[in-house]
Image (cartoon, helix red, strand yellow):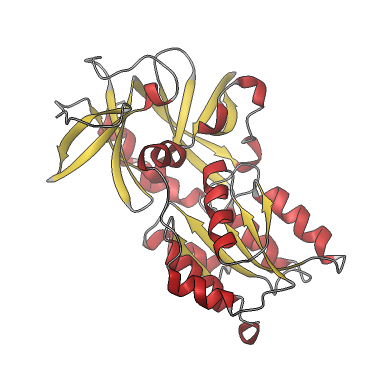
Amino acid sequence: MSTTALLDSVESHTRLAGHNRVAMLLFRLGDRQLFGINVFKVREVLRKPPMEQLPGMHEWLAGSFDYRGKTIPVIDLAQAMGYPALRDLDTAHVVVTEFSRSMQGFLVADFQRIVHCSGESLEAPPVTLGFGSRVNAVSRFDGQLMAVVDVENVLASIEGAPAEVSSRLQHEAEHRDFSPRRIMVVDDSFVARQRLVGLFKQMNIDCVIAQDGREALEQLTAMSEGTDERITLVISDIEMPRLDGYALTRAIRETPALRQLKVVLHSSLSGIFNEALVREVGADRFIAKFQPDLLAKTVLELMDPSTN
């Protein structure tokens, strides 16, 4: 199947979103291991174009090229994942992606096809598989293991430390008494969880952590039956194994003991389509990753007792 025919079908996959289902673009990095990336992050798949090299580039960067009038960096995903570099492989492909408010390419050995999978079929990778933090879910197709690459993690490793909350908003947070109000952070990405916990630490807000929607729902249900802990706000990723952010939000709104919770969907996936689904499932806000001040301002507003 040509890249054009492959990605022409992406629009039909949007019908899966909001129903705990996802479409994955499958590819390889040099051996038979299958890897995947959410098609919502993919703009196009190209044969490797000529690329420009710049001194001082990160070792994972294969170069940059002109994509529709815009210069975008190309990350050698094989090298980032511990495989031999692909930058000299003439038959390599570039997966052009857009997420976290930026556009970049990922160099892969080849692409395979698009497959559909349910959230329940995706699970956190066992440590014994050796993928580390750059794979955030695994599943099986036709008897083969498929590993979902945490491309946000890869990008964050290149970009370095995230921006901090501005001193103005930190100062405003210091004058608020959030106790006993707490935030639940739900994200399958270790890097994303670290960033969010660090952000709320700057604001002196306590956090509870969940690694996917199913774990979050179980924790919230258990907490609703007691009085020791009180969650006021849930900040959840959208793409997660077992139960995604849309399905989690729906479950919260359909559960009498939980429906009063404020819910912010915080995702690297952005655009009009996501915003429409946010309204459909009943989330209070959608914020594209990673905008510390916007997220901090939203948290201050939603955790204000007068808004609850």
Q: Position of residue 291 (x, y in %)?
A: 42, 60
Quarter where residue 141 is shown: top right
Q: Position of residue 281 (x, y in %)?
A: 57, 65
Residue 213 is left or right of residue 58, and the answer is right
For residue 142, say whether it is visible.
Answer: no
Quarter where residue 29 is shown: top left
Residue 116 vs 81, above or below: the answer is below
For residue 216, say whether it is visible.
Answer: yes
Give 222 or 60, whichever is nearer the viewer. 60
Residue depicted at x 42% and y 16%: 83
Residue 170 vs 121, above or below: the answer is below
Residue 181 is left or right of residue 274, and the answer is right
Q: Quadrant of the C terminus?
A: bottom right
Residue 214 vs 137, above or below: the answer is below
Give 167 or 64, whichever is nearer the viewer. 167
Residue depicted at x 67% and y 75%: 178
Q: Position of residue 34 (x, y in %)?
A: 48, 22
Residue ranking furthest to the right: 226
Residue depicted at x 28% and y 25%: 93
Q: Quadrant of the N terminus?
A: top left
